Image (cartoon, rainbow, N blue to C red):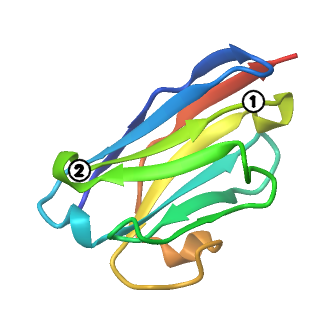
């Protein structure tokens, strides 16, 4: 069992940056694949980025490639999402998610554990 707590969201102008963090409880964090998703009002939750347990592999949604970077520090039980060059369409609640078994990165159903989300609002 693992609990995930996101932080780092906020209000930022277009072109700005934020660093989202997701702190995990539990001693087995280093064995979890982790992902970030986002959900805007009235829209379905969508995949943003994923990272393997060893950080050797990362995957991104096309809409964020080159602007967002996912990373993790297993010693601190934390996964990060650096979000740069923000656009108003990036406005959403951002969620981190974790799983112990491999699956389709982009499918929310493939993740067992979820945080409560952190809001990112980008003004134009």
Q: What residue sits 75% from the left and 41% below the top?
A: 40
As drawn, 84 above or below 25: above
Instruction: Count neighbours of disc 1 (C-alpha within 10 A) and say few if under 14, some if 14 to 19, many if 20 or more.
Output: many
Q: Is residue 114 above or below residue 121?
A: below
Q: Quadrant location of the N terminus? A: bottom left
Residue shown at 44%/85% (left/top)?
Answer: 102
Instruction: Say if 103 sits above or below 58 in the image.
Output: below
In percent of width and height, residue 123 lies at 81, 16
Residue 10 falls in image quadrant:
top right
Q: How many marks?
A: 2
Direction from residue 104 to residue 123 in the image, left or right: right
* Residue at left offset 11%, top offset 61%: 27
Q: Observer-nearest residue: 65 or 4?
A: 65
Q: Do the numbered discs 1 and 2 sit on residues whose CB atoms are within 8 Å? A: no
Circle 2 sits in a helix, a strand or a loop, which is it? loop
Disc 1, SS: loop
The residue singled out by tag 1 in the image is: 86
On screen, 66 above or below 46?
Answer: above
- Read off the residue under disc 2: 77
Across and down, in percent, residue 70 comes to 51, 51
Q: CA distance from mark 1 to mark 2?
A: 26 Å
Q: Is residue 1 at all visible to an observer of this figure?
A: no
Q: Quadrant of the C terminus?
A: top right
Q: Is residue 23 visible?
A: yes
């Amino acid at each position: 069992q693992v609990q995930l707590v996101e932080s780092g969201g906020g209000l930022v102008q277009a072109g700005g940056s934020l660093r989202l963090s997701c702190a995990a409880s539990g001693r087995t964090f280093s064995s979890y694949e982790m992902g970030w998703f986002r959900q805007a009002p009235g829209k379905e939750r969508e995949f943003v980025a994923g990272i393997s347990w060893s950080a050797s592999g990362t995957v991104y949604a096309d809409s964020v490639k080159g602007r967002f970077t996912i990373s993790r520090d297993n010693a601190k039980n934390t996964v990060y999402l650096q979000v740069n060059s923000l656009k108003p369409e990036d406005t959403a609640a951002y969620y981190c998610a974790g799983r112990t078994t491999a699956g389709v990165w982009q499918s929310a159903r493939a993740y067992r554990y979820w945080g409560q989300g952190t809001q990112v609002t980008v003004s134009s």
